[in-house]
Image: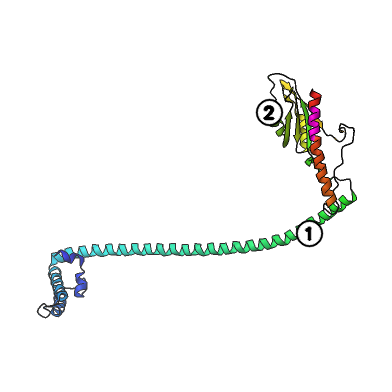
Amino acid sequence: MDRVKEKDLYALLEIEPDADEKTIKKAYRKKALTCHPDKNPDNEEAIKRFHELSDALEVLTDENTRKAYDNVLKARKAADLRSRQLDGKRRKLKDELEAKEHAAKFEEEYSKKSDEEKLAREIERLRKEGSRQLEKEQELMRQQLAEEAANPKQSYVPEANQKAKLKVKWSKSSDSPYNRESLEKIFTKYGQVTAVVVNEKKGGSALIEFESASDAKMAANIETGFMDSPLKVKLLGDDKEDKSSNGEQAKPQMQFPANGLVNQTDFESLVLRKLRQEEERKRLIAQMLAEDD
């Protein structure tokens, strides 16, 4: 009889749960006649249904058994109802979650499309404003070229980009803290040092070459070396005082053409000036060594 726990016997007989015994028997006879084994000897489904109808008759026609069954049936239906309600909530939550995900995806796609449209508009605005800025800068360049043409004394190479040299001296001693590496480290803090030549013969002096004249001037005005062995720093090549050894005035810088172009003659002058600068550098090194001797 355990199989009746999972069955709804009232539904099996197609009667109401409050049906009386007469109604139960009448419904049983009507159903059982259609699936009686004598009428369906080879139909297993019909025979199975006949036994289920017989179980329903036995349970529902006994008062105590019917009460116990009704309690089990009510509990099972209540559990099924709760399960369906829970499933319904789960389905609702699932549907709500899917709806939110769909809305978020739509919003993201819309936002992405909107951001791309904004970017396109900003690029177009920047292109227009950039064109105006370009025109403004080109006009400023034309004005600057006109000023340079009116002022031919303006140098082609800015002073800040001209190389400059320093002569440094210190007291000679066996434990002197100065050598090529230490001097380069000391003066590099002012700017790019392109060469350091130390008097290896006697020591006590060196030549420091800077990439920028302004950096060299700063080092000459500030640097004093170590406290226990101070440095004397002198700027070489100053146009106001410095002249070459044969008494000739330093060569003027090549002038910047008004049209911004360098012709063949100017290019040759630039090459010759570079060669003269290199020779001057060698001469200064030799002069420094000769002075130390």
Residue 40: x and y, percent? 12, 79
Query: In the current view of this chain or complex, which residue is farthest to the top?
Result: 174
Say what secondary structure mark 1 lies in: helix
Q: Which mark is residue 182?
A: 2
Q: Is residue 285 magenta?
A: yes
Task: Give yes or no for contact between labels 1 and 2 (Cβ–Cβ under 8 Å).
Answer: no
Q: Give the percent coordinates (x, y) of residue 142.
A: 83, 55
Which quadrant of the figure contains the N terminus? bottom left
Against 62, is 42 above or below? below
Say which quarter of the image contains residue 205.
top right
Q: Position of residue 61 (x, y in %)?
A: 13, 70
Q: Amino acid at mark 1?
A: Glu
Examine the rendered structure and indicate whether residue 271 appears above or below residue 105: above
* Residue 4 lies in quadrant: bottom left
Give left or right: position of 63 versus 91: left
Q: Is residue 85 left or right of residue 229?
A: left
Measured in 3D between alpha carbons, the distance from the residue under mark 1 to the one under mark 2, in whole angstroms, is 50 Å
Amino acid identity at mark 2: Ser
**Residue at (79, 23) in percent of width and height:** 292
Report the residue at 59% width, 63% height from top. 114
- From which residue to which does the magenta span run? 281-288
Secondary structure mainly formed by the magenta segment: helix
| Residue at image coords 85%, 53% | 145
Q: How is the image coloured?
A: rainbow
Q: Is residue 7 left or right of residue 228?
A: left
* Quarter of the figure with the C terminus: top right
User: Which residue does the numbered mark 1 point to in the structure image?
Assistant: 135
